[in-house]
Image (cartoon, rainbow, N blue to C red):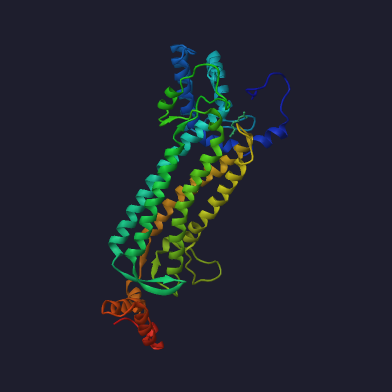
Amino acid sequence: MKKLWQKNKNRLMVEVEAFETKGDLLLDQKLIPFDIQGSIAHAKMLKKIHVLTAQELQILLKGLEKINSLYKQNKFLLSFGDEDMHSKLEDFLTKNYGEVGKKIHTGRSRNDQVLTALRLYSISELKEIKFLIKKLIKTLKSYKKEFGSISMPGYTHMQKAMPSSIGLWIENFIAALEDDFKNANNVQDIINQSPLGSAAGYGVPINLNKEFTARLLGFKKVQENPIYCQNSRGKFDANILSALIQLLLTINKLASDFLLFTTTEFSFFQASEDITTGSSIMPQKKNLDIAELLRSKVHLVLGNYVQIVSLSSNLISGYNRDLQDSKKSLMESLEITKDSLKITQLLLLSIKPNKEHLKETITKELFAAEKALNLVLKGDNFRDAYQKIGKNLKGSEKNEKEK
Ligand code: ARG
């Protein structure tokens, strides 16, 4: 495909083109619907400011609709030779609808196009993530309702510490997810600014109606400074990942707990066979790989976060192609997070407490602090009460069941 910027017969070396587009085309393929959305809004705006006639707009809208339907049928595919989704869109419009295709790029650049597409995509992913968090909170609430009254030991330093319950333990994840939801919401709010119209990063000397396109695309406001539009790409993406990391930290803790609590030594919980795997050599094994792979995800996204911050720092203001390489980190992290939320949901539905065994784990020494505090209520000072109870804890009593 002839490049949008190609002015003569000289062509880019095949090796160079491969190096510049490899991998990125697959990511752009997923972003096409958002580039179409951005293009529809831009075309409507061009008509509003009299760059396009009503008839030309209709042709362009028809063309963009056609691309949309081909895309849905898996027939609008980027392949080697297409520089990116933006070029492919314009090329298709020009080849199939003539002159009018050559007009759609008036007042825009691939630099603000990619920002717009990524932002629309990120907002739509964050909306789905928020929905999945809500769903998980709901499942945790019913888990708590069903099993919350069952006692279990609480640990500090990985040693039995105080009496706790499934209810208290589950509630902690609900509270964490509620905060994670706020983080996701907050970052969605921050990135909810339209960069369309910032063009290459310095605006254009014609009067685009940026408010109009922002409104059509559902953005809360226009991101006014065109240089900041470009400079915010890495910052916004890192901000999104930081919210995802918070969420994955919650999932990591839940998974770690379940891994320990389902060992034969602990046996607090039992996972159903349809979520456990076996071993190729040890016939007895029942492994909870699902929780291990949930536990690992925060580390992957943390790696992606470092990539984004690193790729976007030390660049000068304005568009830098380095940022293309951060697209994978962003998109992969959003995918990972959605999958993790769905799988955590499944995990909870397939894991049940061993009620009888949990009763046995509530041993006498767990109540030592409570006993000391009872003495305080009767008039002792805490330190003396602590000593009294501590001295009376006979070795044999340490693991005795509370009668
Ligand atoms: N593929 C590019 C990216 O992700 C799109 C913008 C390219 N702009 C350019 N002038 N080459 O950043």
Is any part of residue 13 visible from this angle? yes
Quadrant of res 310: top right
Image-based side of 394 in relation to 17, left or right: left
Classify residue 403 as left or right of residue 9: left
Q: Quadrant of residue 24?
A: top right
Position of residue 402 relative to residue 107, above or below, is below
401 is higher (above) or lower (below) than 316? below
Residue 134: x and y in percent read: 35, 49
Residue 299 in picture, x, y percent from top left: 54, 55
**294 to 372, vertically: above or below:** above
Q: Residue at x 56, y 18 (%)?
A: 94
Please identify the quadrant where the N terminus is shown: top right
Picture coordinates of residue 63, whole percent (x, y): 48, 21
Which of 274/294 is in front?
Answer: 294
Ligand 1 position by quadrant: top right
Residues 200 and 110: in front is 200
- Quarter occupied by the C terminus: bottom left
Residue at far left of view: 378
Q: Can residue 360 be spotted in the picture?
A: no
Residue shown at 39% from the left, 47% from the top? 182
Q: How many numbered marks appear?
A: 0
Q: Residue 2: horizontal and vertical position, in percent?
A: 65, 23
Between residue 38 and residue 368, name the one nearer to us: 368
